[in-house]
Image (spheres, grey):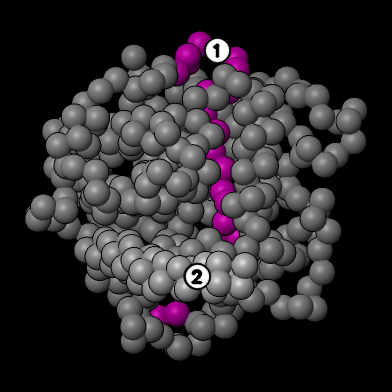
Amino acid sequence: MELKRTCLCAATIVALCFTIPLGMQIYTAHSKKINDIAAVCADLTVGEYRIPETTPEVTEPPSVQTNPAEKSVSTVSRKTLWDIDMAPEETQPVIHSKQLPSAKPSQEILDKIKYPESLENHDGVIQEYTYPHYSGTQYIDLKAGGQVRNCTDVPNATLIAESTKELPFKLDKNSEQPQVLIYHTHTTESFEPYERDFYDSSFASKTTDMTKNIVSVGDNICKQLDKAGIAYVHDTLVHDYPSYNEAYASSRKTVQEILKQYPSIKICLDIHRDGIQRADGTRISPVTQIGGKKAAQIMIISGCDDGTMGMPDYLQNFRLASRLQSQIESDWKGLTRPVLFDYRHYNQDLTTGSLLIEVGSHGNSIEQAQYSGELIGQSIAKLFDT
């Protein structure tokens, strides 16, 4: 018996000697593949939200307290969708006229992270930059206009073929039921107070003032949808405060609740602003001239599933990304940066029309970003003007 145990132990040790190095080789090869993809996708500048979702952008002051239930309400064109945390008798939609202004958050919410009254310290440089048309095997020229930056192993030919296919849905412009959802996972993302070449580092480019953050950009998108007669929901709940780390979990819950109440919704657009900064601290303001005014350049992000993300229909999202990219470039040449097609999730498994759109960066002025929102809204309306 003792001899058998000794042989068994010896056999186990020999097996481990072979399997451990083999496992390390597989892990190293997989890591190298991921690193190679990352290296190919490395840009001139670093995007603030091209970091893992579990890494906080800033640390909120510990002295500030908030109640998670104290959130703004969502608004629906022609209807109002109240915060799901409110009393049951208040959750029923209320019929309104076609044009409905965005919901106003309570003063208590506005006071959480106020927009500074003065930002005049010259602590760093803001540099304007216009993202151009690119060349190279990583970039795909869409037949109808615009480009895609392929940071995946999916062949370019596959993406080109997919970009020409019909969308998996149609919008019903005659319906009273919402067709589009506009929301903001990083609701407090904000911009510079005016166009300038310096920034004040005391401002973390975040505020709960809905007139100065990314929600105001969403408002401008929705105004154009409303003019075109496209029913929509604009979710203005604050998802990234007090917990930045839980922002995507928070917005996912909200989007799921909205889709449950309004299954008519076909398109879900998560509107953000980027945060582009060089190693020396210079902040980049991506801009272009549209109609004699400066507009913040935008970037559509369409996620790709590597087999672990639970997004089997990601290529259907890509069809919308391609169509919208081409429509915007056709309407407003130079407004877009190439679509980023990469291994990202961003809750894009919830519909076949789910995308993330970065509008400008923290170096852009609020006016430039809001103008881009207006242009995006017009292009969405035109894309479905059939």
Q: Which residue is drawn at 52% across and 43% down?
A: 347
Relative to residue 312, is residue 297 drawn left or right? left
Please state the horizontal and vertical placement of residue 140, each as a whole percent of the image: 16, 45
- Name the amino acid type tagged 2: Cys
From this view, report whether residue 205 is shown above or below residue 215: below
SS state under label 2: helix
Q: In which quarter of the image is residue 96?
A: top right
Foreground residue, 233 or 99?
233
Please state the horizontal and vertical placement of residue 234, each as a whole percent of the image: 60, 37
Q: Which of marks 2 and 1 is nearer the N terminus?
A: 2
Q: Please, what is the dominant secondary structure of the magenta stretch?
A: loop
From this view, report whether residue 17 is shown above or below residue 347: below
* Residue 247 among magenta residues: no
From this view, report whether residue 322 is shown above or below residue 7: above
Relative to residue 184, is residue 44 drawn left or right? left
**Quarter of the image where the C terminus is located:** top left
Q: Residue furthest top?
A: 174
Please state the horizontal and vertical placement of residue 80, each as a whole percent of the image: 71, 29
Q: In which quarter of the image is residue 58?
A: bottom right
Please state the horizontal and vertical placement of residue 320, each as a whole percent of the image: 35, 32
Range covered by the magenta-colored residues = 171-199
Mark 1 crowd level (few <14, some 14–19, many ≥20, 10 Å Cα): few
- Name the amino acid type tagged 1: Ser
Can you identify the residue that label 1 sits on? 175
Q: Residue at x 38, y 84 (%)?
A: 281
Foreground residue, 17 or 93?
17
Nearest to viewer (mark 2 / mark 1): 2
Foreground residue, 65 or 5?
5
Which dot marks residue 327? Answer: none
Q: Which residue is drawn at 64% across and 35% down?
A: 256
Can you identify the residue that label 2 sits on? 7
What's the CA distance linking mark 2 and mark 1? 75 Å
